[in-house]
Amino acid sequence: MNLCQLPIDVLYNILNYLPGYQLSRLSSTSTVFYQLIQDDLLWKDKIDSELTKKPTFINRENNYAYYRRIYIGPRKSLHVLSHYLPPQRRYMSSTRGLQIHNLPRRYLSYSDYIIDQISSHDDTARWINKRKEFLRVAAEFGLEVWGRNIIQQILSKCGELKFSNTKSSSPFYIAILNDQLHFIPMLQQYSWPIELNPWASSESNNNNGMLINGLLKCGADGVELLRDYFMHINLPIIHQTALSGDYRRLQDWLERNITSFNDVFPFSVLFMAVLGQNVNCLRLLVHHGWIPANRKIKGIEWPINELILAMTTDNLLGFQIILEESRISVPLDCIRHCVAFALQHGQTQFINDLLNRQYQNMVQEEIYLLSRRIISHKNVKIAHLIRWAGPLSKQLILMLVPLLPYCCQSQSSYSDFGNYDEALSMATMLQDYSLTIEQIVQQTPFYQLIQFCKAIIDYSDRLDDNSYSIVLNIVVKARPLITLSDTLVQQKYDLVCAEYIRLIISWGADGMVYRRNRKGQTTYELIMQSRKECWIKALPSDNQLEAKLKK
């Protein structure tokens, strides 16, 4: 029996036992295997088992493109690593035109192949230096599976992790500065020198600005690691008390009116109470006159204060305590930065709380400024509707807030999802034949965005039915740029786009299909040029247009 004649599920089980580099070679043997190996979920499993559990995609690449990029190695690192081989053992001198099947028949990656080849050519010192280079690449790209293999090789030969005592060479700092926080728990499983491990208890680590700034830039996951970091180092006693939640000891310190400790550590005691999510300590500090303060963090566009920290940790109760129970009014600058942060990160519950506190004008101003920023980047034409509509109601603002992170993405109006990680869910839904077209449509952020456009057009007196042409043109012009390798999946995605067109036309944009744009084209002509039958069927009939004109 021919191998290609086996059932699909059996073939998938066979492919799961093969490493990624062998799958790439197998795809060139027959059309059947080529189509099977194009499955993006198969490459996702290979990435999870061989490289990392949390891949970082760039330039809208899929799992196969990511595996190939990491397997080959980054362009700069590959050039450096190639010089570690003797001239007669180099397989390449440049990265131009390099394909995955050109690589040596070794497991995992090209860098792993180099590890095996150089082991018999160098002394121990040079051997360790090269492993340090490999581990730096693994930390930069978050390849914890590969990084674990490198560490185990070092330990098996040297018995300990020998590195230079500089922060720039520490894989902890490299991973944090590149937002690869999932790499940190893997590193913490091993014993590191104190100078390289920021979680080691040391007085010199109290003012570790590089680590603190890097973790704050990473959002909720970074704040969780920052809390763990502060618990392991020698903090001032009052800060340690607020972080751990020792209410009685904190009360004793405050009753003795000790205020000089505020200058010892760069972060306030109130900051530590919010970071530790200790409600009682937070309320005690607020009653004694502690208020939020902005701190400019290098690499972050907005200052960090206690309100923003509460939003990052999703601590609504702590957020409300600071605003409600403060003896001194919270500075407006802190609240304004807080509003801007909440809008850009889709924090609906915090915006709702601010709207209930008569901050609607401030929220409206920040929405206007954010829409100008979106327009200046030429990302979302729908942002024009926000500016033209005028002041929004509370209901519209709460409807808009979850969509703003999607609108701020560079490709938001041109795809159904904001980034490639989310777009993978679209490919998964298209391959799930138990879902109807309507169910797929309703689960996309773009669908929620056009629903908001309908609500804002119906609400505002400044907008009319002509505004629907903006939304319709985005669908008709941008969606043909998205092409999928599988013909059946492509046809299903065309039906999803046809549902967008049918939905927008049903709202009152049927007369807009014959309206000419600046280039002299009509939407009707663009749809006919696409030659997509499902799109053409979504157009209104001549009888429907005549009936609308009579009305």
Image (cartoon, grey):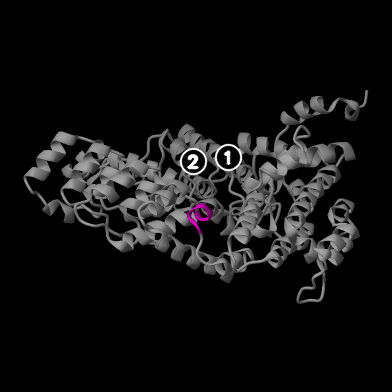
| Whole-number angstrom distance, CA of label 1 to CA of label 2 | 9 Å
| 535 lies left or right of 351 | right
Compared to 26, does 61 lie above or below?
below
* Res. 34 image quadrant: top right
Compared to 75, does 255 lie above or below?
above
- Secondary structure under tag 1 reads loop
Magenta stretch prevailing secondary structure: helix
Residue 52 is marked as 1
Along the viewing direction, whichever of 498 and 377 lies nearer the viewer: 498
The residue stretch that appears in magenta = 393-397
> Are circles 1 and 2 on residues that touch, CB within 8 Å?
yes
Residue 47, percent across and down?
A: 64, 39
Q: Residues within 10 Å of mark 1 (few under 14, many from 20)?
A: many
As drawn, the residue found furthest toward the left would be 256
Residue drawn at the location 70% of the way across and 62% of the way down: 468
- Secondary structure under tag 2 reads loop
Residue drawn at the location 31% of the way across and 43% of the way down: 318
Q: Is residue 75 visible?
A: no
Compared to 5, does 427 lie above or below?
below
Residue 178, percent across and down?
A: 48, 52
Q: Quadrant of the N terminus?
A: top right
Residue 39, percent across and down?
A: 76, 39
Residue drawn at the location 90% of the way across and 52% of the way down: 533
Give the tally of numbered discs. Answer: 2
As drawn, the residue found furthest toward the right would be 1
Q: Residues within 10 Å of mark 2 (few under 14, many from 20)?
A: some
